Structures are given as C-alpha cells and as structure tokens.
Image: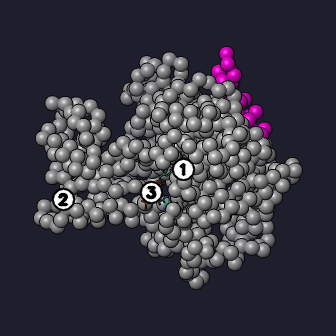
Amino acid sequence: MGAYSDMYARWQADPQGFWAQAAEAIDWVAKPTAILDDSAKPIYRWFPGGTVNTAWNCLDRHVLAGRGDQDALIYDSPVTNIKTRFTYAQLLAKVAELAGALRLRGIEKGDRVIIYMPMVPEAVFAMLACARLGAIHSVVFGGFAAKELATRIDDAKPKAILSASCGVEPGRTVAYKPLLDEAIEIAQTKPGFCLILQRPMLEASLVAGRDFDWGKVVPGSAPADCVPVASTDPLYVLYTSGTTGIPKGVVRDNAGHMVALAWSMKHIYGIEPGEVWWAASDVGWVVGHSYIAYGPLLVGATSILYEGKPVGTPDAGAFWRVIAEYGVAALFCAPTAFRAIKKEDPEGKLVGQYDLAKFRTLFLAGERGDPDTIQWAERLLGVPVIDHWWQTESGWPMVANLVGVELLPVKYGSPSVPVPGYDIRVLDNDNKEVARGDIGSIVVKLPLAPGALPTLWHNDEGYIRSYLQDFPGYYKTGDAGYIDEDGYLYVMSRTDDIINVAGHRLSTGGMEEVLASHQAVAECAVIGVADALKGQVPIGFVVLKSGVNRPEAEIERELVKLVRDRIGPVAAFKTVTVVKRLPKTRSGKILRGTMRKIADSEAWTMPATIDDPVILDEIAENLRTVGYAKEAKGAA
Ligand code: COA
Ligand code: AMP
C-alpha cells in the first residue's frame, strides 16, 4: 500500500488513537479526559475534559520556542500600497494589547464579538485577541450589506463589534461605518460598544458613548494573558448560507479545530514551520479563518494577508509578484482567481517576470476546479495543482490529494480521495450506498472529524434537522456526485438552492426573498447559471402583479439595486427579467432546474408534470434577450 492508503487505513482502524496522536502537536493547559464524547449522539464532541487556548498555540508558544523574530503575518495591500510585516513577537504584542483593550471594556470568556472588517492585519489581531480572552468571534464578510450584518448581530448577540471606517476595492472605497450604523439600527440586539479602525482613505464619524477610535484606545493597553477554555468551548461562529435567507451559525470549537488544522498544514498542504504560505481568500470566509489566520500560525509558518485581487491590482501578474517577493511555498485560492488571470493574460506571459523558485504547490477549492483552468495552471507554473473539497461546516478539507503524505495521480474534475477523519459515502434517497460511478448525495459517516462543526450556534435542533435527519447516521453535505473505481470523488452539483459565485456561497432562496419583497412583484425565481469567470452567477425572473404598468426596465433596475442593498455586492446579482409566467409542475413547484438547463444551453427534457409547456418557450425567449440560452437544445 502507498503512504496515503496506509494512513487512511490507520485512521479507519483506530480513529481515536489517530487523533490522540495528532493532539500531541498542540499545547494543552490540561489534557483531555477522553478523545471522543459520543454520549449525546448524534452530537459528538472531541477532546472532552481538556483545557486549551488557541491564541497561546498560535503565538506565545512559538515565541517561547525561539520563533519570535520570524515573520508570522505579512500584510500586502496593492490597493493601498502598504506592505507590513509582523514577527511572531510583534503579532503577540499586538494581539495581547488589543485583548487588553477589549477586557478593559468588559469582554470576557464566552462573550460574542462581531468582526466586520476589510483585509487589514487588525482583522487577524481581532480574531486572535478574542481567542486569547476566550471570547467567541464572528467575522462577517465586508461585501455583505447592512441587513445581512443585522441578521448576524441578532443571532450572535455580540457584546462588541470591531469594524473599520472603510474597505478598499479597486477603483472605489467602500464605507463600512454607515453599513454598520444601519445594521445596528435594524438589529434588535444592540452591542455594548464598537471599536472602529479609522483608515486614512475615509474616516468615519463616531457615535459618542458607543464607538471608540481603535487608534486612540488600543495602543498602550495593558496586555492580556491567555484565558484557558474548555476544548469544546466555541472559538468562533461563522455564518454561512443555508437554504433560506437566514444564515446558519457554524460553531467551531477550540481543541478539535487546532488539532485538525495543525495536522492539515503538514499532511495535506505539506507546509513546514518557517515556510511562507498564502491563502488568497478573505477573513470573512472559512478559508480566511482556517488558512489565513489559524492554520499557518498553529504550525509556526508565515501567513500572507493580501488586500487585492488577482487582476487589476495592478495587473494579472499580481499573484506571481507576491509569490516571488515573499518566497511563497504554496498558494491556496479559488479557481475563479485563476480564470480571471487566464482571461487577462491567456499565455501567462507575466509569469516570466518573476522568480517562482520556492513555489511548490497550488491548491484550489471553494468551487469545482474545472479541468481547463487546472491544466492551464499546471502548464504555466510547472507545479502540482491540487483541487480539494470542503465547506464552511467541515472547516478543513474532507477530500484532497494529500501532498504532505503522498502525491497521488491527479484526475481532472476530481478533488481526489477522502482525508483521514472523513468516511465519505454516496447514498440514494433510501439511505443506501449507490454503485461506484453512480451519482447520489455525498454524505459523511458520523462522527465528523475534529475541527468540523459540532453543532449550530444555540441550535442543536436546527443542526440535526439541516444536516443529520435526512440520512440517519450520516452528515449531509448538500453536494451530489459520485466515487469512481479508484475511490476518487467527483462533486457535480448541489442538492439545494445554494450557488457558488466566484467561490462565494450564496442562497438563491435568500435572493428570492428579497425580490418577493418588492411591491411590484407577484412571484419570482432565482437560478444560478454558468459564467466563464465566476463559475456561476444568479439571474432572476419576476412576474409582476396585475395592474403594474410601469416600464419593466425601471423595475428591473430597482430589483438589482434591492438585492445589492439587502444582500450586498458580493451576490453579483446583475440580471433580472420580467416574465409573464413561471414554468411550474401541476403541483405548483417552479421548474428551476429546467430553466437553468435552458439558460446554459444544455440538453433538457420536457418535465412530464409540467403545467403548461409553452411557458418554457417564453422563458427561453426572455433568456436570449439577456444573453443566455444561445443554443436551443430543447426536447419536444
Ligand atoms: N467589501 C466590499 N465589497 C466587496 C468586498 C468587500 N470585502 N469584496 C467584494 N466586494 C464587491 C466587489 O467590489 C464587487 O462589487 P461590484 O459589483 O461593484 O464590482 C462585488 O462585491 C463582487 O466581488 P468579487 O466576487 O470579488 O468580484 P469581482 O468582479 O470584483 O472580481 C474575481 C472577480 C474573480 C477577481 C474575484 O471574485 C476573486 O478574486 N475571487 C476570489 C474568490 C475568493 O477569494 N473566494 C473565497 C473562497 S476561497
Ligand atoms: P463554502 O461553505 O463557502 O466553503 O462552500 C462549500 C461548497 O462549495 C461545497 O459544499 C461545494 O458545493 C463547493 N465546493 C467547495 N470546494 C469544491 C471543490 N473542490 N469542488 C467542487 N465543489 C466545491
């Protein structure tokens, strides 16, 4: 057997022994009394009885071990022309000082703190400062609008919100503070205080008594020490799109998370202490949590925090510049970033200007890694390009080609094989395993690995209903696909209404709720259609209420603005079309799947249960006017 098969078999034979050994990679205040607590099935908890601190493991212990002068975090911001390096000792000082300032204002273990910040180093300081105090952070992505932020405030009930005056997107400054003020206004729960980082590009006005200026109150604060927390105490809550407009609060615990991430850095990504690692994501997403902030620091690597885009900041050579400048060993990004680079510089001419000698591996995840993009990157960079599959809920890869263990042959279109900790199965609707090569629901046999969500925030029942109920004994990933003869997984689609726009996970149901709230709209549907750059983009169909006789173009413009204002620019909702009727089954279910196939010019069959087939012709006609359904591949 090869090294990967050996390791997977070792985990299968003794999962608890496997994780007990992995747990030696972190410092414990008190060792756990057991490895797995399965007394409250189907909810499992890893490393019960133990006591730890995540910030200690990310910072203090490395400084004590002599790593204090090594770079921990490199901030590179082409949008502001700022580059700053923080050694482990400097990062520890920044985090302890911020933790001190928070503690002074009443933040304690178990309190929630929302972090609504752009890609600045203070966002990482904030996460680690919360971890230091045992406070539970919840980072909200900056591209979300006030309403989305308000929903998260009401669920997390934070004692404090940490934010900045603005974000910087290419060509525009995004004022965060008005969005924060509006969100607090809408929310039922009001935070005790806000700490605002004033950025020089756009200073915000502060609300007296509620808002503090970060630059004035944090420097000089007495540093706070690490507060020991239980293994199973939450480190953070990260909200992710579910099947409605209400996001799910994914809980991450402290010990299981650390053990899993430290293990993954070495065995999946092949990163050694002291090496430079770059996850080109955002702190608002799970990739930013696991692989900008926590993972690299847990293993004593150097992490890059990049405030820029793959193209346009200033050009399609930006990624190569960063890799060369800092000697990056491995990069993790979404395939969409490479599609953007390929579009601007199809022959990859800009690579030639940089020395990529230290670069070993490119990792792609967040959406399907399309073979064209993977092969293009392979040719261009001459290194392994590794697609791997996971989700916010798992917190770290479930299926991957484990470069740090053994590089298996790459099969295009597949993220490869199960990671130890995850027993991946493909089931039919009767909970039975399908034959190899047959498509079904991708599920994971319980218990999930350490690091994966133990539950949803204050919502065990919602956790069970959303993930565990449909396939008893298994966790439902919401993805569909198949496993081939060699055990490689192929992820083909979602089984729910989630779409993936430029690696960002969004709910079409949430967008439908926004469209339906417009006074002119009688009913609506939103589907995700194929997009050469972003993978998928949403398009909306609305039926107007009878008697509405305003120009359709005017209503369409209002609807696009409404989604941008309510969900945020990240939804990339730019196309909506007024239709006379929506295609439905006789029982009234909207035929979204058929609409999507027509839009993508895929072959489709007339659903037997359709109410009125003519409507699909009308939909195809509408789609052509907005640039889709170019080739008619319809069935009679
Ligand atoms: N704050 C405020 N607005 C933001 C934002 C933030 N943090 N991040 C994105 N936005 C805005 C953008 O400005 C854009 O607004 P626009 O409609 O006015 O142009 C919109 O949200 C969509 O942003 P984005 O998805 O980044 O698309 P883009 O067209 O600006 O860039 C890519 C396209 C492919 C270059 C870009 O999507 C990319 O780099 N993707 C990487 C994906 C990624 O990191 N995924 C994380 C999971 S690994
Ligand atoms: P998120 O929770 O935002 O990380 O999104 C997770 C979802 O993105 C998964 O459930 C998949 O639908 C999709 N996804 C992530 N990585 C991959 C991949 N490598 N291949 C296919 N789909 C992926």
Tag 1, which secondary structure? loop
Q: Is mark 3 within 8 Å of ligand 1?
A: yes
Residue 9: % across, % down: 65, 21
Residue 570: mark in rendering: 3
* Amino acid type of the residue tagged 2 in the rendering: Leu
Which residue is the site of mark 2? Answer: 544
Q: Residue at x 21, y 55 (%)?
A: 578
Judging from the image, the colouring scheme is one colour
Query: Any magenta on residue 7?
Result: yes
Query: Any magenta on residue 304?
Result: no
- Mark 3 to mark 2: distance in Å? 26 Å
What's the magenta bit mostly, secondary-structure-wise?
A: helix
Judging depth in this view, the residue of 493 and 153 nearest the camera is 493
Dot placed on the residue nearer the N-terminal end, 1 or 3 = 1
Judging depth in this view, the residue of 421 and 602 nearest the camera is 602
The answer to whether residue 476 of the structure is visible from this angle is no
Q: Residue at x 72, y 67 (%)?
A: 98
Q: Quadrant of the C terminus?
A: top left
**Is 298 situated left or right of 240 in this image?**
right
Which one is in front in this view, the residue at disc 1 or the one at disc 3? 1
Dot placed on the residue nearer the N-terminal end, 3 or 2 = 2
Dot placed on the residue nearer the N-terminal end, 1 or 2 = 1
- Mark 1 to mark 3: distance in Å? 21 Å
| Depicted 220 relative to depicted 508: above or below | below
Tag 2, which secondary structure? strand
Q: Residue at x 63, y 77 (%)?
A: 212
Residue 450: % across, % down: 64, 39
Which one is in front in this view, the residue at disc 3 or the one at disc 2? 3
Residue 316: mark in rendering: 1
Tag 3, which secondary structure? helix
Judging depth in this view, the residue of 146 and 28 nearest the camera is 146
